[in-house]
Image (cartoon, rainbow, N blue to C red):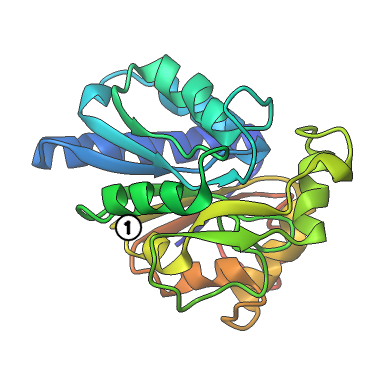
Amino acid sequence: MVRILPTRQELAVAAADHAAESLRTLLRQQDMVRLLAATGASQIEFLNHLTAIRGIDWLRVELFHLDEYVGLGIEHPASFARYIKERIVHRTGITVYHLLDGTRPEREMLTAINQEIAKTRVDLAFVGIGENGHLAFNDPPADFEAEDPYLIVNLDQACREQQVGEGWFTSLSEVPHQAISISIQQLLKAKEILCIVPDKRKAAAVKACLEGPLSPAAPASALRVHPNATIFLDAASASLLSRDEDNR
């Protein structure tokens, strides 16, 4: 399903309401909920709204995040582990969470996080779509076949330039060339996926991923094969779509 909201703020509220209801439903059905969360500029308003909603027992939520730069520690302003702690953990009181440490030896980090996430299925995943169509840090051409839950991936120039454009780094030379990223196959194993994609700068990627071929060249096109994925767009990010995607 694709939902198109008029503005970025309306998108954030609608996605947060949906996420909150999904969490409440899951928490009524089971003791713990496993949540996989995206980071980045596109998720800030959504997470602001979600973490302010009452009636969610966050102490019964186990949290993972999508990706982290190789070589960056949690003290770096661009660290996604830092983002997760500041924007989700500290605001909700979650006590069970698994942070990716970009300074830890790569194979050691992969072994540890892969063992944790493989213990049981992820219930709910929050994702975005990059300006180059990436899903997590799976830049094009993405590996649609890799079975390992997390991978070491190479970041292309478009992805690295996006990080500078969003203000996480002051120059391209500062942006790492590699990241730890959840794999496409692992992401698609989540029971439900919510994809939050505001802004005009994402419009070309949205069109390619929703209307183009299902292809590693448009990594987020993989969401189209998931049976329970909802993509939230605003008028700007949906502006290049050639058909009415709303509520399909």
Picture coordinates of residue 84, whole percent (x, y): 49, 29
Q: Is residue 11 above or below residue 220?
A: above
Q: Is residue 34 visible?
A: yes
> In which quadrant of the rendered image does the N terminus lie?
bottom left
Q: Is residue 91 left or right of residue 168?
A: left
Residue 140 placement: quadrant = bottom right
Q: Is residue 124 above or below residue 58?
A: below
Who's the residue at 57% across and 66% down the image?
A: 220
Who's the residue at 32% across and 63% down the image?
A: 189
Q: Residues within 10 Å of mark 1 (few under 14, many from 20)?
A: many
Q: Is residue 231 left or right of residue 139?
A: left
Q: Is residue 155 left or right of residue 229?
A: right
Who's the residue at 56% across and 39% down the image?
A: 39
State the residue in front, 51 or 154. 154
Picture coordinates of residue 233, whole percent (x, y): 60, 51
State the residue in front, 205 or 1. 205
Q: Is residue 191 left or right of residue 71?
A: left
* Residue type at numbered disc 1: Ala
State the residue in front, 68 or 185. 68
Picture coordinates of residue 147, whole percent (x, y): 38, 72
Q: How many marks?
A: 1
State the residue in front, 79 or 187. 79
Q: Is residue 123 visible?
A: no
Who's the residue at 49% across and 48% down the image?
A: 66
Please name the residue that numbered disc 1 is placed on: 190
Residue 169 placement: quadrant = top right
Q: Secondary structure at mark 1?
A: loop
Q: Is residue 222 above or below residue 195?
A: below
